[in-house]
Amino acid sequence: MDARDADFKKELDATLQTRRELGEEYESALVDSFLEKVDQRIDGAVERRVRRQFAEHRMTAARDSRSPRPVDSFGERFGFGIVSLVLAIPLSAIGGGVGHLPGLLVTWAGVVGVNVVQVARTNPGLFGRRHGTGKDDAWED
């Protein structure tokens, strides 16, 4: 039992004791007084609950209003393309020098594969849209 419940119980006991001492002619006034205190306590609890829910709603709205960082920014795509081409030059030299034409083809297949994965990551709907969540669901082009 918290302090407010203990105070409330004391108030009820005091009201009942007063009714015994003063008699039935004051019963209506005593009940009205006690009910007014009950109303005030309920109003206070409702007000606290409404304020808390309003604050939670405002926090949720503030969190939702923040826009996430775009996944597919021009700088990210441009940088990835530049790095890919820069690394493709020495990899082509190594692949062509060691494996000749097949080595060069494997090297460029890897460069193209990495770039396709990057495009698929930054543009999820580009290669088709998945329906449902089950493992047997179909892909749509």
Image (cartoon, rainbow, N blue to C red):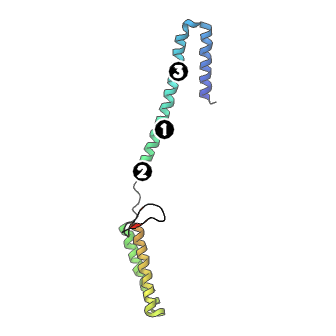
Question: Residue 126 at what x, y percent from top left?
Answer: 36, 68
Amino acid type, label 1: Arg
Q: Mark 3 points at which residue?
A: 37
Tags 2 and 1 in contact by the CB under 8 Å rule?
A: no
49 or 27, which is in the foreground? 27
Whether 100 is drawn above or below 57: the answer is below
What residue is shown at x 50% (from left), y 28% (from top)? 44
Q: In this view, does 52 lie to the left or right of 22?
A: left
Q: Name the residue under label 1.
A: 52
Quarter of the picture holding the C terminus: bottom left
Question: Residue 84 at what x, y percent from top left?
Answer: 41, 78
Amino acid type, label 2: Asp
Question: Residue 128 at what x, y percent from top left?
Answer: 38, 68
Amino acid type, label 3: Lys
Residue 90 visible: no
Assess disc 2: are there few (<14), some (14-19) or many (≥20) residues with their C-alpha within 10 Å of its C-alpha.
few
Q: Mark 2 points at which residue?
A: 64
Whether 65 is drawn above or below 135: the answer is above
Assess disc 1: are there few (<14), some (14-19) or many (≥20) residues with their C-alpha within 10 Å of its C-alpha.
few
Quadrant housing residue 5: top right
Quarter of the picture holding the N terminus: top right
What residue is shown at x 38% (from left), y 76% (from top)? 81
Assess disc 3: are there few (<14), some (14-19) or many (≥20) residues with their C-alpha within 10 Å of its C-alpha.
some
Sequence-wise, which precedes: disc 1 or disc 3?
3
Label 2 sits on a secondary structure element that is helix
Residue 139 visible: yes
